[in-house]
Image (cartoon, rainbow, N blue to C red):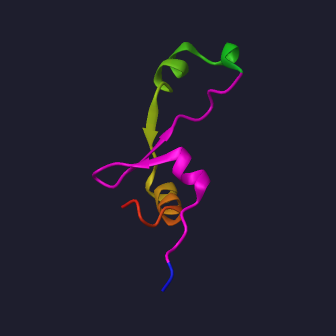
Amino acid sequence: MPKMKTKSSAKKRFKVTASGRVVAGQAGKRHGMIKRHKKFIRTARGTTTLCAADEKIVKGYMPYSR
């Protein structure tokens, strides 16, 4: 059986933690910061873990990073 390929876009955007959760960059911070609340900008700093449904999709893109 040949090896499965990893999606190049997924390996650049996501990282799997030791416990198996998927970490991604926070969405909604590319532009339009003037209209965002200060609280949103503070809480959207850094990275976030994906929900279970999105996590299942991303893990399908990266078969060997579990």
| 13 to 58, vertically: above or below | above
Seen as rendered, the residue at the extreme bottom is 1
Residue 50 vs residue 64, the one in the foreground? 64
Horizontal side of residue 29 vs 64, given as left or right: right
Residue at 54% across / 63% down in the picture?
6
Return the x and y of residue 5 as percentages of the image width and height: 55, 68
Return the x and y of residue 60 as percentages of the image width and height: 51, 66
| 61 to 33, vertically: above or below | below
Residue at 49% across / 76% down in the picture?
3
Residues rendered magenta in the picture: 3-31
Seen as rendered, the residue at the extreme left is 19
**Quadrant in the rendering for residue 20:** bottom left
Residue 28 vs residue 22, the one in the foreground? 22
Residue at 59% across / 55% down in the picture?
8
Residue at 46% across / 28% down in the picture?
46
In magenta segment, residue 29: yes
- Number of labels in the image equals 0
In magenta segment, residue 63: no
Return the x and y of residue 40 as percentages of the image width and height: 54, 22
Quarter of the picture containing the C terminus is bottom left
Residue 44 vs residue 5, the one in the foreground? 5
Seen as rendered, the residue at the extreme front is 2
